[in-house]
Amino acid sequence: MTDRRDLPINNSKCRPLLIREYSHMIIKDIEAIPLNMPYRPELAPHLIRSGMTAFNNRMTLYRVELEGGAVGYGDQLGGLDDVSGFIGRQAIAGLVEIRHPGVQMACYDAVGRALDLPVAGWLPVPEGPGLGVEVDQEAVEMLRRTPVPETKRRIATVLYPDGTQWHFADETQRHEAYHFGNAPGFVRGVRLETREDDGSADFADLFDRCSKEPVLNG
């Protein structure tokens, strides 16, 4: 049955469109694909900033399929969520109403592909339908089969140009320190370094102190 409710769709490359909500835009199925991302020491600062290490390098890829056959993908850090409640929902309305980041992103991708429209944004993005990228299915299968990485102790250190150092034992601790104003704001020249457990007494002592509260040196 066709739902005759009109919904506005905006796109930077065309005037606002008014389309009708058809059954082919209903979410038919959602697959949650767990991925274990390999830890690469040379990328450690970037992984920490992204929040990946806080989830033990685990993320989930959500595949949304619409009744009309369009498929979209979205991702979210961490393990699987039960998203079955979104099945049967209208994907266009879901662009606003669905608050799950991974599923919402996948809806943007699927709806864009169904309408053959790119998703507009502030940053340059590929101009193909939806999010404009094609998922490498072989890579997805490889990461799905990758064992869960071993949890390692790491210390993240924020270094300021004046020599001040703030040491943190985990990402939640670091984010909260800056979010609540307990640590000073970032300035030009600040950088983030990581140190993995090397088995030394020095590391063990600093990690133990960081586990209780951020450690300030300098």
Image: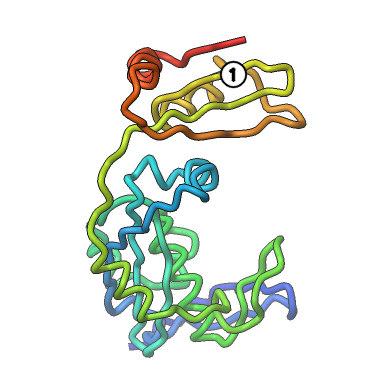
Give how far across and how far down residue 16 sits, in percent.
69, 75
Q: Residue at x 73, y 23 (%)?
A: 161
Q: How many marks?
A: 1
Q: Where is 48 relative to 114, above or below?
A: above
Identity, as a three-letter code, of the amino acid under mark 1: Gln
Q: Which quadrant holds the N terminus?
A: bottom left
Label 1 neighbourhood size at 10 Å, few (<14), some (14-19), many (20+)? some
Report helix, strand or loop for mark 1. Answer: strand
Q: Where is 92 relative to 149, above or below?
A: below
| Picture colour scheme | rainbow
Q: Which quadrant holds the C terminus?
A: top right
Q: Where is 89 relative to 134, above or below?
A: above
Residue 147 versus residue 26: which sits nearer the camera? 147
For label 1, the residue is 165
Give how far across and how far down residue 200 sits, in percent.
34, 23
Q: Quadrant of residue 179?
A: top right
Q: Residue at x 64, y 77 (%)?
A: 126
Q: Quadrant of residue 178?
A: top right
Q: Residue at x 47, y 65 (%)?
A: 105
Give how far across and how far down residue 39 sits, in percent.
39, 52
Left or right: residue 78 versus residue 15 is left
Q: Where is 207 relative to 171, above or below?
A: above
Residue 18 versus residue 160: which sits nearer the camera? 160
Residue 28 versus residue 118: which sits nearer the camera? 118
Q: Residue at x 31, y 59 (%)?
A: 36
Left or right: residue 66 versus residue 4 is left
